[in-house]
Amino acid sequence: MVKTDVIILAGGISNRFGMPKPFLSFDSNSSFLEKIVSVYQEFGCCDVVLVMNQKHSPLFCSTIPELFRSKIKIIYNSRTELGRFYSIKLGVDSLTDSDYCFIQNIDNPFTDTNILKLLFESREENSYVSPAHLNKGGHPILLPRMIISKIREEKNIERNTKEFLNQFNKINVGVKNDKVLANINTPEDYEIYFKKPVSINKYCDRHL
């Protein structure tokens, strides 16, 4: 059996957005985080790892139901200044015996099981897989065991993620869904995609 996991990256400080992205409203019933986790659980990922900014821990614990929290592995990043690669490495170091691992950004909540299946069906042991729309690479990406091991072995925790991955072969999987390119970094980005002003999960509203 192939063990496939996911690392959800939510370790940033959301300076440009002004509020923590994990708690933004995806729809009337779920936040970005809840929606993303549900997709990966539906796909069948064994371990769902959330790498979160440690400053958001009180909000996370006070607003996200305990049952939901019990289904994921939470890793707190206290050194967000070190960048994206450090968050990935924190997540990778928490994994056990992964054959493949998705890397999912919190600021793209549009991932669906169809995209995950396309990536997984294109997997290779020595390459990582990325969705592409009109020849532009998007997210999430799928890493094989070999690259997962290389991340675990890497001593420079401030590596540039793109430069690190450029060492390896990349498989681009063409998709028609342009939302694989989404990157919601500002309130303006949110309004473009959701056609409404910024809103946050109803459980979090009173805590911000």
Image (cartoon, helix red, strand yellow):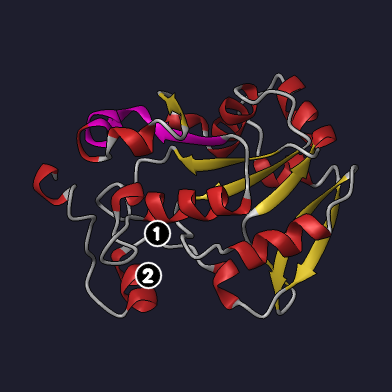
Q: Are marks 1 and 2 in contact (CB under 8 Å)?
A: yes
Q: Quadrant of residue 193?
A: bottom left
Residue 156, percent from left and from top? 68, 23
**Residue 189, disc:** 2
Give the residue at x 41% y 34%. Answer: 52
**Residue 153, disc:** none
Give the residue at x 80% y 64%. Answer: 172
Q: Is residue 163 left or right of residue 46?
A: right
Q: Quadrant of residue 145?
A: top right
Mark 2 secondary-structure assignment = helix
Residue 207, percent from left and from top? 12, 42
Question: For the residue marked with disc 1, what is the amino acid?
Answer: Asn
Mark 1 secondary-structure assignment = loop
Label 1 environment density (alpha carbons within 10 Å; few <14, some 14–19, many ≥20):
some
Magenta stretch in the rendered image: 48-61
Per the model, the C-alpha gap separating discs 1 and 2 is 6 Å
- The verdict on residue 56 being magenta is yes
Give the residue at x 84% y 59%. Answer: 122
Label 2 environment density (alpha carbons within 10 Å; few <14, some 14–19, many ≥20):
some
Residue 43, percent from left and from top? 62, 53
Q: Which residue is mark 1?
A: 185
Front position in the image: 132 or 42: 42
Give the residue at x 67% y 80%. Answer: 176
Question: For the residue marked with disc 2, what is the amino acid?
Answer: Asp
Position of 76 relative to 100 (above/below): above
Quadrant of the rendering where the C terminus is positioned: top left
Quadrant of the rendering where the N terminus is positioned: top right
